[in-house]
Image (cartoon, rainbow, N blue to C red):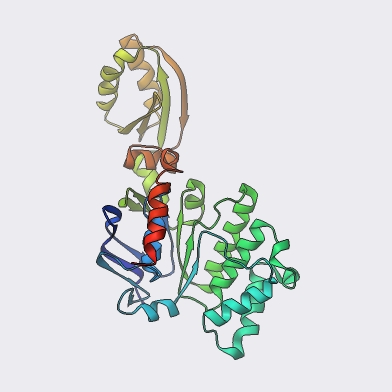
Amino acid sequence: MLLYAIETNSLTKEFDKVRAVDNISFKVDTGEIFGFLGPNGAGKSTTMMILTTLLKPTSGNASVSGFDVVSQATKVRQNIGYVQQEISVDEFLSGRENLLIQARLNHVPKDQVEKRIDEVLDLVELTDKQKDAALTYSGGMRKRLDIAGGLLNRPKVLFLDEPTVGLDIQTRRKIWEYIKKIHVEFEMSIFLSTHYMEEADQLCDRIAIIDYGKIQANDTPKSMKTALGNYSVTFTINDLNKKSNFLEKIKEIEYVKDITIKDEKITVFSSKEAIMYSIFNLSSGLGIEINSITFTQPTLDDVFIAYTGHDLRDNVGTYDRRKEHIKMKRIRA
């Protein structure tokens, strides 16, 4: 069995003067769910399109299931499933008819088509709706049908590009259940991109944080959060003139791991619960009044800010012009 389902080395993709993917290297272990976490325009979809052979890299190399994505593109396609961000089902065809088309496109052996369609319909719980036009399906049902299509060729690696974007939280969580179920039943490696923190935390064995085309961190969600400390304290103060001195004093505390500032809110990460007492003690000694304070455990939001210097939501919705530019260039890449 292959050690790595995906392996990239100094992978770079440029569009004119825009570097969408900037010299990234990472490995995905066989059998794991690996997440690419980042805002819109960070390079997630571009990376995925290179790995699925829809784009050629400007430089660097990548292999999927042991095959080079450029020189062995046909072999790569035979071993992967790809579910793109935009739902691609034909609304005027039934669920089963959509899957029949997918089976032909993926060269599923004729004697296995019906059996495999039955299997995936059962897996995503659409057997009862298979004869209905996809036009009558909810958004969640269409996404499940899309995922079913990506499973027909029994891929070794399944790529999911923003699998729950645009869905309500209840439907999103239902899709998570299907992804977990697929992972176990098919024993496949899954590579998914997302800008939902909870999605990455719930689904992924490991996460790579990508921002401005660069990988900022790569580890398990638990390890990322633990690295910041077991405790986080977020607070605001009245006298901003004393903030710099206050922060310097906090940094001198031996069990303080990191400090971030967002919208006047100061967050201190610590390995010890005593950090709350220490902050109050310092503020009292410096004559600083604390307006509000919360005491929690670090989240992936905290991790993202610590590595990138900004909230993930700060960039959601930006880079639209670049994204459209990239789409227009793909056909000529």
For image coordinates 40% across by 24% down, the residue present is 276
Compare residues 27 and 150 and report the one nearer the observer: 150
Task: Give percent across and percent down for residue 62.
Answer: 30, 69
* Above or below, 330 relative to 259: below
- Residue at image coords 45%, 43%: 316
The percent coordinates of residue 242 (x first, y second) are 30, 14
Quarter in which the C terminus is drawn: bottom left
Q: Measuring from the top left, give residue 265's x and y in whole percent.
A: 41, 25
Q: Quadrant of residue 45?
A: bottom left
Q: Is residue 286 above or below residue 121?
A: above
- Horizontally, is 95 left or right of 69 in the view? right
Q: Which of the image's four quarters has the N terminus? A: bottom left
Does 6 sit above or below residue 209? Answer: below
Name the quadrant containing residue 288.
top left
For the image, the number of numbered tags is 0
Displayed quadrant of residue 78: bottom left
**Residue at the location (53% across, 79% down)?**
105
Residue 147 in view here: yes
Image coordinates of residue 178 in percent, x first then y, are: 60, 62
Relative placement, left or right, of 97 versus 297 is right
Front residue of 133 and 256: 133
Asked if residue 207 shows in the view, the reply is no
Instruction: Kindly give the residue lying farthest to the bottom in the view shown.
Output: 111
